Amino acid sequence: MQFTCNHPWPRAVMTILMMAGASFATAGAAPALPLPAPRNLPDNGLARTPPMGWNSWNHFAGRITDADVRAMANAMVATGMKDAGYVYVNIDDTWEGKRNAAGEIQPNEKFPDMKALADYVHAKGLKLGIYSSPGPTTCAKFEGSYGHELQDARTYAAWGIDYLKYDYCGASDVYQLTLDNQRGVFQKMGEALAKVERPIVYSLSLGNVHEPWKWGAGTGANLWRTTDDIKDNWTSMESNGFAQLAITGYVKPGHWNDPDMLEVGNGGMTADEYRTHMSLWAMLSAPLLAGNDLRTMTGETKSILLNREVIAVDQEAMPKAAHRIDTRGDMDIIARTMNDGSVVVGLFNRGKSDVDMSFDLAEIRRGKTPKPAVVRDLWAHTTAAVDKGRVSVNVPSHGVSLLRVASNDAGK
């Protein structure tokens, strides 16, 4: 049986119906429970840099098991991913069983003991994440948290869960897709998480309906999906990533735009496209949640996911917003000033042929007279040439040149 998580097509259909004034409650669906009055919840103090880790959906989908999660935790340590900053091991949909007589959610037969699994992951120096929905069922039609928000939050805390991905699509069986309803169901779980004595990173999964980057933080969330589900192909990744440039101003410590998980290593794109994927997510301060099989990574995949210089761009505290400094046809030049005064410049070739791309140092310094600069190539790990204040590189089709420009006295 195939499951599709956070389906893009139902959201599109629901949006059309909503505009026509239709109700999304299905025949025989559960009644819509009251939602809390909108208010801004306090910052929970978590995720001060974008979360890094791994999520099960892109590779395993509904096949994920306890044994798979343990194997991924082992691989995160053995491959050096943990040392590079990847710490969350996140179980997506299809772990859920039924509720017991007291209404407490139970894992299904694939996960015989969630507390023991959390203990295993924690013993590796990692953290465990889980998934649910504010609806009666999840996207894959497993048990959701509808009417059991506080009870589920307490259960997750008792198990030792560190991260919750909360996916709206199940709620569409009960509520109309309005801003108040969407915000209300997420705020309800945010209030529940705030009442348990365990820090749990809160991730909203909903797409770009009603612009969650404007209100997601108020629900207690640390990150919010801003796109439909990513797919392991150039068109999907390019669309999700470059669209974020319009909303980078909403990013701040503890609150992150999420263009969805990484597809690096899943085989649907070229190495150049995966480097573009990783570079763009880093420039955007996006969460870095790998979605491949960590046990079978090639050396090339490891070189992309474990590039410490690129990860450092993503993980900078108090990040400044990335912005376009030039666009010409299929070429985009994006810059982001770092806290040490250096500027990271991404030269992205979105076209079908290799191209020569260049920029003046004065361009990225907003017209200021450039000081003598050192230009570091973050993928080649070499120093790039500067000729009369200009940097020129050849960028492959669907590829990127990611450069960090620093004055001679500022270091790399």
Image (tube, rainbow, N blue to C red):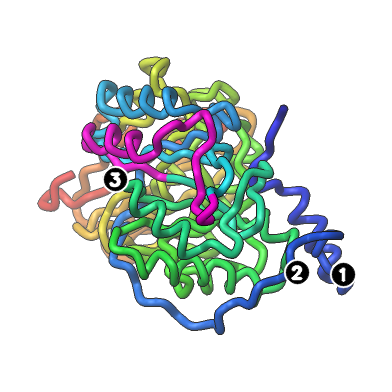
Residue 387 seen in the current view: no
**Which quadrant, please, contains the C terminus?**
top left
Q: Amino acid at mark 3?
A: Arg
User: What's the magenta region?
Assistant: 101-129
Check disc 1 and give the amino acid type: Ala
Q: Are there few (<14), some (14-19), or many (20+) residues within 10 Å of tag 3?
A: many
- Residue occupying the point 60% across, 41% down: 230
Q: Residue at x 61, y 28 (%)?
A: 353
Relative vertical location of residue 81 with respect to residue 153 in this rendering, above or below: above
Q: Which numbered mark, 2 or 3, is in the foreground of this view? A: 2
The verdict on residue 224 being magenta is no
- Dividing the picture into quadrants, the one containing residue 46 is bottom left
Q: Which residue is tagged 3?
A: 404
Pick whichever, 215 or 383, lies toward us: 215
CA separation in Å, label 1 and label 2: 8 Å
Question: Residue 141: which quarter of the image?
Answer: top right
| Image quadrant where one finds the N terminus | top right
Type of amino acid under label 2: Gln
